[in-house]
């Protein structure tokens, strides 16, 4: 059977673009369909604009710290529109870069929503295309709780394009997108409240990190309401939102941002009709080679809901392309994937949390320290930094590295290589630090923390 293409990719986001380019590099005839912007969520409404906003929010602290270093700074004056427009310009540039990369790789780009018509057939606009392999890389979308008035709130998608900054904002949620946006708003001068139904932020992260981060965010002026449900939103005067909380109280905000989770975008474009099996949450179920229950249909990235991160989607795409179009099979390795949360202060982490380590290993040793970084000693800022190592007491292997503090992602990325390589605590100890840095503390931890059973009531 002759197909129009060897590979037809649906979705030109982080995973789709990399899979298309690599498969084409291996000599496959490739087409890719995109209904919105090239680069997908990360480039247009995720990692990149979020980090640019986060930088903007940090600048205010830099101005505040300046006095301690001898600088006099005039009246501060922030223009949201300028930041938003500059960000838009940079994203438009990146969109073009993605287009050029696809063209240079010889990938045919089709603009429009793709519909799957069968195991080897896709429709875009008025035309049908056939392909030996279909790759679904359609990402995920924000979900909001099913409460009355939910449509009066926004999600992160709209937060990147706000016409003006609110005076008073409520961020609903406790995951990384919630803490990042609460930090951005707060840093840009918005009176910010974060409401979360659980008792701690950042589910899945190390418990010490979760507690430490909440304390530092509160110190910066973010009001955090734990164990708090939002029951309903009502339209108030001048575009305001009245929010009814689970404890019966009401408050008025200028903006309510729901950061309450993201669901795989697997429905509404014909996939269900082909018999592709989906998990209850809509994730496309795939095997190690990213093959779905329909042998010619593959999926990767956020739509398979393993680790919803751009570098993970990219690694999955490289494993997919090499396995199906290259010379040899390549498996995706989900062990020890490092990650950062760009809250203020930021979080960096790789490997196991202390709780996970205690479940899997019988002798776990913990080294931890909290301190005021040198940079802040000349400033009034009382922010502290936290670092932690989780070690297997039997083999001495470092199982987890955790940090809350400035540039935690930059620090932990390097340590992730060591963890991936199976570094021991002795190897950390034998590594000479770079002085004076925050990162050197991670190779200078000598004092073991008492095991929980020895700690008593602290
Ligand atoms: P996407 O990048 O979402 O791409 C999917 C593409 O498919 C989209 O362009 C969509 O328009 C298109 N599409 C969908 N259906 C169709 C159709 N039927 N036809 C044609 N096109 C279609 N990750 C990090 O690693 N670091 C971060 O700091 C980070 N920050 C984030 C912040 C926010 C606010 C959000 C929302 C996400 C963030 N992420 C971050 C996650 C990251 O963006 C995703 O993991 C990544 O984009 C997933 O890539 P993907 O290829 O699976 O999907």
Image (cartoon, grey):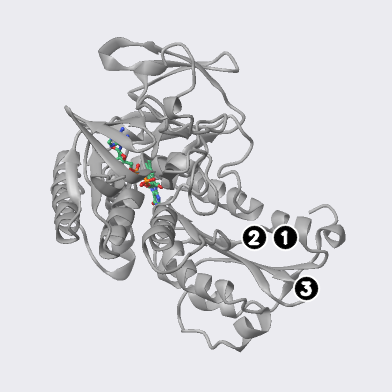
Question: Quadrant of residue 101 in the image?
Answer: bottom left
Residue picked out by circle 3: 393
Circle 1 crowding by C-alpha within 10 Å: few under 14, some 14–19, many from 20: some
Q: Position of residue 281 (x, y in %)?
A: 54, 31
Q: CA distance from mark 1 to mark 2?
A: 6 Å
Answer above or below: position of 408 versus 126.
below
Residue at position x 62%, y 84% from top? Answer: 427
- Secondary structure found at label 1: helix
User: First in sequence: mark 3 or mark 2?
Assistant: 2
- Secondary structure found at label 3: loop
Q: Position of residue 381 (x, y in %)?
A: 43, 58
Viewer-proximal residue among 106 and 28: 28
Answer above or below: position of 440 versus 227.
below
Q: Is residue 341 left or right of residue 457?
A: left
Total count of labels: 3
Quarter holding the N terminus? top left
Residue picked out by circle 2: 352
Query: Please, which residue is most extreme toward the front here?
Result: 1
Residue picked out by circle 1: 357
Viewer-proximal residue among 418 and 325: 325
Verify CB contact (< 8 Å) between mark 1 and mark 2: yes
Residue at position x 72%, y 60% from top? Answer: 357
Q: CA distance from mark 3 to mark 2?
A: 14 Å
Circle 2 crowding by C-alpha within 10 Å: few under 14, some 14–19, many from 20: many
Q: Quadrant of ligand 1?
A: top left
Q: Position of residue 356 (x, y in %)?
A: 70, 55
């Amino acid at each position: 059977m002759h197909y129009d293409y060897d590979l037809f990719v649906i979705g030109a986001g982080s995973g789709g673009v990399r899979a298309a380019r690599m498969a084409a590099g291996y000599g496959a005839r490739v087409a890719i369909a995109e209904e919105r912007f090239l680069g997908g969520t990360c480039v247009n409404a995720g990692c990149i604009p979020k980090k640019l906003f986060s930088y903007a929010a940090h600048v205010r602290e830099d101005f505040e710290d300046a006095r301690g270093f001898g600088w006099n700074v005039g009246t501060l004056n922030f223009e949201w529109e300028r930041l938003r427009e500059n960000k838009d310009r940079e994203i438009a540039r990146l969109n073009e870069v993605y287009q050029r990369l696809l063209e240079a790789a010889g990938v045919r780009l089709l603009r429009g929503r793709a519909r799957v018509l069968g195991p080897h057939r896709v429709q875009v606009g008025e035309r049908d295309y056939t392909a030996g392999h279909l790759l679904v890389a359609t990402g995920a979308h924000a979900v909001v709780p099913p409460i009355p008035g939910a449509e009066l709130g926004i999600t992160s998608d709209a937060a990147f394009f706000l016409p003006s900054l609110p005076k008073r904002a409520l961020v609903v949620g406790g995951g990384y997108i919630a803490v990042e946006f609460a930090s951005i708003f707060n840093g840009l001068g918005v009176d910010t409240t974060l409401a979360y139904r659980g008792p701690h932020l950042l589910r899945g992260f190390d418990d010490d990190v979760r507690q430490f981060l909440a304390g530092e965010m509160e110190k910066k002026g973010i009001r955090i309401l734990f164990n708090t449900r939002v029951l309903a939103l009502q339209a108030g005067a001048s575009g305001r939102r009245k929010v009814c909380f689970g404890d019966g109280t009401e408050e008025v905000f200028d903006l309510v941002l729901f950061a309450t989770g993201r669901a795989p975008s697997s429905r509404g474009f014909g996939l269900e009709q082909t018999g592709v099996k989906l998990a209850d949450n809509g994730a496309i179920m795939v095997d190690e080679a990213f093959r779905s229950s329909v042998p010619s249909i593959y999926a990767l990235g956020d739509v398979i809901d393993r680790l919803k991160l751009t570098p993970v989607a990219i690694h999955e795409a490289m494993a997919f392309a090499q396995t199906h179009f290259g010379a040899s099979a390549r498996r995706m390795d989900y062990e020890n994937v490092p990650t950062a949360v760009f809250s203020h202060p930021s979080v960096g982490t790789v490997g196991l949390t202390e709780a996970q380590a205690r479940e899997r290993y019988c002798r776990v040793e913990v080294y931890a320290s909290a301190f005021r970084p040198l940079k802040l000693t000349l400033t009034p800022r009382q922010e502290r930094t936290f670092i932690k190592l989780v070690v297997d007491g039997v083999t001495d292997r470092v199982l987890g590295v955790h940090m809350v503090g400035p540039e935690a992602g930059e620090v932990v990325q390097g340590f992730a290589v060591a963890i991936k390589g199976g570094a021991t605590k002795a190897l950390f100890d034998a590594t000479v630090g770079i002085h004076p840095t925050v990162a050197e503390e991670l190779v200078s931890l000598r004092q073991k923390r008492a095991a929980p059973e020895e700690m008593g009531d602290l």
